[in-house]
Image (cartoon, grey):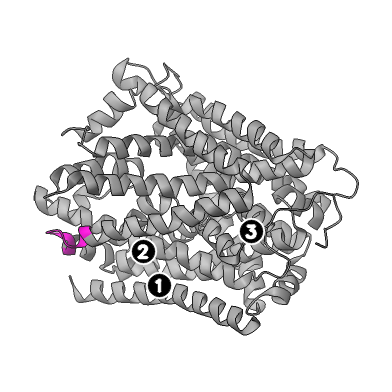
Amino acid sequence: MNVREQWGTRAGFILAAIGSAVGLGNIWRFPYVAFENGGGAFFLPYLFALLTAGIPLLIMEFTLGHKYRGSAPLSYARMNKKTEWIGWWQVAISFVIATYYAVIIAWSMSYTYFAVNQRWGEDTGGFLMGEYLQRIDVVSGGAPGDIGALVPGVFIPLVLVWIITLGVLFKGIRRGIEIANRIFIPLLVAMFLLIVIRAITLEGALAGLDAFFKPDWNEIMSPGVWVAAYGQIFFSLSIAFAIMITYSSYLSRKSDITNNAFITGFSNSSFELLAGIGVFAALGFMANASGVGVADVADAGIGLAFVVFPEIINTFPGMNGLFGVLFFGSLVLAGLSSLISIVETFVSGVQDKFKFSRRKAVAIGGGLSALISILFATQGGLFFLDATDYFINQFGVALAGLVSVIAVSWFVKKLPELQTHANGVSDFRLGSWWKICLSIITPIVLGFMFIQNTINNLTDNYEGYSTAFIVGSGWLVAIVAIIIGFIFAKFKWKSGDMNIPRK
Amino acid sequence: MSGGAVTMMIFGMLIIWGGLGLSIANAVKVSKSKR
């Protein structure tokens, strides 16, 4: 049996886990979700969600990988053969996410270059959809579902994204992923700190911060705000798509679990808070310069990053290019460190099950994912990306999280065993609160989210897309991920694979 | 900034950045005691 690779140091593992958790959503999702859901008052449900779902789930996944010492499919199979499909389902979800996530990093790379002389001009929305993405409905009257031609401006940086990602993965855990994150994460924090310092010294920044932090206490009585808080924690911590199980399987036998989960969880939230301050200070400046309210310029996602931020950079009093390069460079770094972790899940899964060498697994798994990602670099790519992203998150990540937590706590009843394992190696001990959070609170919240999402999506098509498009690019993708889970679980393991290595 | 906003800003920073600081301090303390 091959000896499993290991992280060089505990700090190396923590930085890689933080690199995975801190992604584009921290920068472009959290600030707006907080603003929309009670401002400063949102911190209460958000912190409650972090402590009752985020960190407990992180501890569960770290313990699964550490105890069973394998990729997600192997760890689930070693825990109980009947749960192996959950590991493959999570790996399939990661595979889908990798295909479009790489494209968003490619856009960020292009925009880092465009930022130097603000190539996007005055009409930033028109530039994004027309000149840059050449969106099929804008340039040739096409509709969602049409593929159109390949967009070279997206394809070229996409090739670069894959060269970097697969290059890091070829090098392995210690010499590839660990070194990359040791460079990316401190650099990302330093760059974002510069952004925040510059943003809070702009005229109007305080109005932006006031909008972000001002508490609306009536909001926290609304169930929707609590669901938004759990959703934000859940989607931003890289849980339920095999990453944390895979990363912790490379920890040394005696490595801590519980405190590592607290450091990872709080680091992710710390960066989100920093991002909230930077983004809303900049939005406050923009609102002040345009003579409108902060709510009029606040946005999230692609709109915030690629339309509103270029406008802010245009309006800057000086060193516009530098601020732009720092902002989009931060998106590239946050995205790359997450993409590396996402691709590692299927590289590791394939290596474990089919006994491929790392190079072969990276070439096949990463190569296939890179090839499929070209679809999102076409003129119709944005529509496919939008639908796939929504459905794989709502009916992939969130549902896989619900199923995994129910399977572990209720069906195979492994929480006490996992608790004993974590307590045996960790800096501090887990109490019964951990089991209550995972077996009761998390399933209730995720179950509620799932029912609500299902009803909403069966009643109305997401974003008003046609049913045929939504079925093909959304529902089908989420369902195929589950089917792949069952198919891959049917392949036999080699004899001895179910034995947990002692070294 | 309003008083409520300042209070929540300090609250958020204390809990989140304080929580991170405490977890790192705990890890450093334990690793020193193991040496």
Q: Is residue A326 left or right of residue A8?
A: left
| Dot 1 amino acid type | Trp
- Give the residue at x 30% y 49%: A326
Ranked by sequence position, the earlier of labels 3 and 2 is 3
Q: Which residue is mark 3?
A: A7
Q: Are marks 3 and 2 on the same chain?
A: yes
Question: Helix or strand or loop: what does disc 1 sit on?
Answer: helix
Q: Rate crowding at label 3 as few (under 14), some (14 to 19) or many (20 or more) other CA atoms within 10 Å.
A: many
Label 2 marks a residue whose chain is: A
Whether A286 is drawn above or below A149: the answer is below
Q: Nearer the viewer, residue A409 or A359?
A: A359
Q: Position of residue A271 (x, y in %)?
A: 40, 61
Q: Bounds of the magenta span?
A: A198-206
| Quarter occupied by residue A170 | top right
Q: Is residue A410 magenta?
A: no
Inter-mark Cα distance, 1 to 3: 26 Å
- Give the residue at x 73% y 66%: A253
Q: Is residue A152 left or right of residue A406?
A: left
Q: Rate crowding at label 2 as few (under 14), some (14 to 19) or many (20 or more) other CA atoms within 10 Å.
A: many
Label 3 marks a residue whose chain is: A
Q: Nearer the viewer, residue A7 or B26?
A: A7
Q: Position of residue A129 (x, y in %)?
A: 30, 28
Q: Nearer the viewer, residue A488 or A197?
A: A197
Q: Is residue A458 left or right of residue A501?
A: left
Q: Which residue is mark 2?
A: A273
Q: Are marks 1 and 3 on the same chain?
A: no
Q: Which residue is mark 1?
A: B17
2 and 1 marks in contact (CB < 8 Å): yes
Label 1 marks a residue whose chain is: B
Quarter holding the C terminus of chain A?
bottom right
Q: Specify whether residue A49 is in view.
A: no
